[in-house]
Image (cartoon, coloured by chain):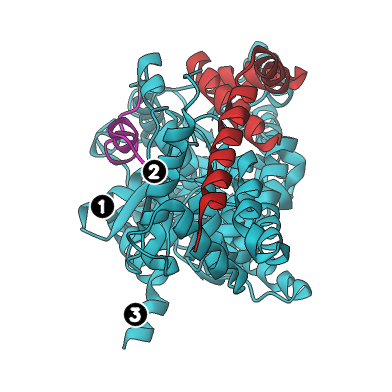
Amino acid sequence: MSPAPSPTAVEAALGARLRAVATALGLPADADPPQQLAALVERVAAGSARDAWLAYTAIAATFPDRNALAAFRRAVELAPSSERVAAALAVSVDDIGRPGRATRGLELVDDPETVLVDVSFSASNDHNTGVQRVVRSFVPHWVASGRPVRLVRWSPFGGAYVDLDDRERARILAWRSGVPTTVADRAAERAERPIVVPWGARVFHPEVLQQAECAAAACLAEYSGAKVGVLGHDTIPVSSADSQPELESERFAKFLDVVKHADFVAGVSRSAADEFAGFATALSAQGLRGPRIVAVPNAVEVPAEARAAVAGEGAGDELPIVLCVGSHEPRKNQEAVLAAAEQLFAEGVRFRMVFVGGGGRQQTASFDAKVARWRTRGMAVESHRRLSDPELWSLYRRARFTVLLSLHEGFGLPVAESVSLGTPVLTSDFGSLAEVAAAGGCVTIDPRSDVQIVDAMRRMLADDELIARLRAEAAAAPERTWAQFADELWQQFTADEQETAK
Amino acid sequence: MPGHDDEAVLRAWSGDVVASYVKRSTPEATGVRRALIMPRWAATVFVRKSREIGFSGALRLARDVAVSRLRAAR
């Protein structure tokens, strides 16, 4: 724990923050802190919630949540004029009296064209699956193409945005897997930084926020005047909560409070957009309009080394490979695929069934036991929890077809990647999977029908003509790049401003 | 115009801020934090996560979750 700041340093930092917001709040620019505070509380007492949001942020060096903002406004409005400053300051002590906050500086971002991109998780963690891969793919295009973006994260001390340090920027703009952060780097990331405050600028959330940040982010969206956008990956934690850890569902429910007050949501598929549109429709019960919602489908770019991994199906393999990629959880439906494979094996159909994907022990233990049982009976079936990228790409390229019969997806990356590599897919006939499948190279069926699964797999294993046609379709399917995704997302998010300017 | 009283108010406030900081930095407060960030479910989640993303990745996630819960526990 660092030594306590001196009262003088706390006062000096407050003075600096008040100077930073002086113009925005109409405070006397060259006055000392007592004079500025006197002007500030008069401004708050005049009644604008937006002004109160910025005033609290400047005093507390922390974005308020709804409760803090209401308490602040109440204290100022109800106090006698001579006691307003004391009342305003008293409310802030709980927030600013936390480690790492008392002497923070403040930078106001008041350019309406600037977008603060909240990349907190991807910037501060080495984890790299679904959402992080999307963030690390499109955000670099925004930066490289000169868009007015500013990458921010929630401060390690909480309560407000700060700029990224070099290490954190590298995690977003120059991601390299397998380069873990050292302990020393983590310590450096906790250095105190000035808070970055949107004031008329826009804010974009490409990630689901951590639960602790949701209340302040929702309050920012509701009161700060910032135009707030969200990238909607899916609503699985609440709409398919049975397959999610409870904490994930709780966190996502809190995140929906941010979505509720956002201006814009881009679903990563039409289905994802529809899910968020359903939530937005429900907001009329609260007298709220909800965000504008559009679909901006994810891109898929497989690296050149993936295409070059192996010549194609059957290279060196004794049996045709059927590949099923995805984390092990009930909605992914691997049990149904395994049951179909067992049925086909019993019929005498010979192929190599390969499952790839991690998962919790509760989900994987019984599945792995079944796989082991069938192996002892001579069935060529295997389940891999972790594979390197080259190993996975090689499997995609060598597979006769892949199977993803999930009951609920936000996008369906394994389907898109398989098609992109020219490998046919058996997938679900609804939702985002059907959207991706429409590009070609796929057979779609009802994933809840065991009979349809068995029939489709049998046909795809036996019918060389069908596989050849699907491969041709996959090869002809248009590729959507992350640059295209980034451009379209930017255009959609900023569309209302551009139309107003016309 | 603000005068002597407002300056005194400001001094009192900065004193309160420092006192709040000190209070949150005591060994007792740290003990409370430990209790907050090490509930029983954490071990289960940690073991599962370490299987998925490796030990060091799970350690970082656990730390981030703990920090988030600490901030939420006002």
Local packing at callout 2 (Cα closer than 10 Å; few below 14, some 14-19, many 20+) is: many
Q: Which kind of residue does numbered mark 2 sit on?
A: Gly
Counting from the top left corner in percent of width and height, residue A58 is at 48, 52
The answer to which of marks 3 and 2 sits earlier in the sequence is 2
Q: Quadrant of residue B45?
A: top right
Q: Which chain is cyan?
A: A
Q: Nearer the viewer, mark 1 or mark 2?
A: 2
Q: Which kind of residue does numbered mark 3 sit on?
A: Gln
Q: Is residue A414 shown left or right of residue A288?
A: left
Asked whether disc 1 touches disc 2, contact meaning CB atoms under 8 Å apart, the reply is no
Question: Rounded to the nearest whole Å, what is the CA distance between mark 1 and mark 3?
Answer: 20 Å
Does the magenta segment cover residue A451?
Answer: no
* Range drawn in magenta: A163-177
Question: Rounded to the nearest whole Å, what is the CA distance between mark 3 and mark 2?
Answer: 33 Å
Q: Residue A105, which numbered label?
A: 2
The residue that label 1 is drawn on is A143
Q: Is residue A395 above or below residue B6?
A: above
The residue that label 3 is drawn on is A498
Q: Colour of chain B?
A: red
Q: Quadrant of the C terminus of chain A?
A: bottom left
Q: Is residue A253 shown left or right of residue A155?
A: right
